[in-house]
Image (cartoon, rainbow, N blue to C red):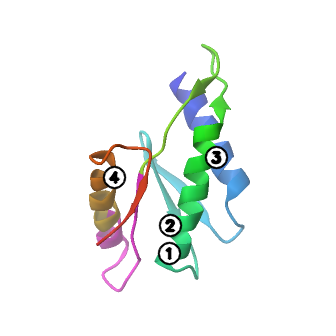
Amino acid sequence: AGDDVLKGFANLMRGMLRLSDMPARLGGEEFVILFADTSLEQALQICERLREQVAATRIPTCRGPIRITVSGGVAELGSDGIEAALRTADQALYKAKHSGRDQFRLAA
């Protein structure tokens, strides 16, 4: 069922993102989306629409359709590079998960 969920989530992302957005799987259940020429607020809005779509979708699996949730952190890619941005986004993800999950948080 795990692979079915990952494929279903990837399909949802592909259907919702713009051509300029670049989603990638980091590993396990972790994904990253690079938004080109997008403010943090705009990126958060896109992520919120994705979260709403995920919440409204039953993903087909070998054990029957299931609902999933998505949590995430949104950070800006600055001059510190991708590793720093990923760390910052991961800290925001941690806050989202510990505030009840099923939400996105902007990095501070």
Q: Count residues near mark 4 (Cα–Cα under 10 Å), then give few for <14, some for 14-19, many for 20+.
A: many
Q: Which residues are magenta?
A: 72-86
Kindly report the distance in space between the C-alpha atoms of the residues bearing marks 1 and 4: 16 Å
Reading the chain from its start, which is encountered first: label 1 or label 3? 1
Q: Residue at x 43, y 56 (%)?
A: 104
Kindly report the distance in space between the C-alpha atoms of the residues bearing marks 4 and 3: 18 Å
Identify residue for label 4: 96
Q: Position of residue 78 (x, y in %)?
A: 37, 83
Q: Position of residue 105 (x, y in %)?
A: 38, 61
Kindly report the distance in space between the C-alpha atoms of the residues bearing marks 2 and 3: 14 Å
Reading the chain from its start, which is encountered first: label 4 or label 3? 3
Reading the chain from its start, which is encountered first: label 1 or label 4? 1
- Dots 4, 3 in contact, CB < 8 A: no
Identify residue for label 1: 41
Q: Mark 3 falls on what kind of element?
A: helix
Amino acid type, residue under disc 3 in the picture: Gln
Amino acid type, residue under disc 4 in the picture: Ala
Please name whichever residue, 106 or 89, is drawn nearer the observer in this view of the structure: 106
Q: Position of residue 98 (x, y in %)?
A: 26, 46
Amino acid type, residue under disc 2 in the picture: Leu
* Quarter of image, res 63: top right
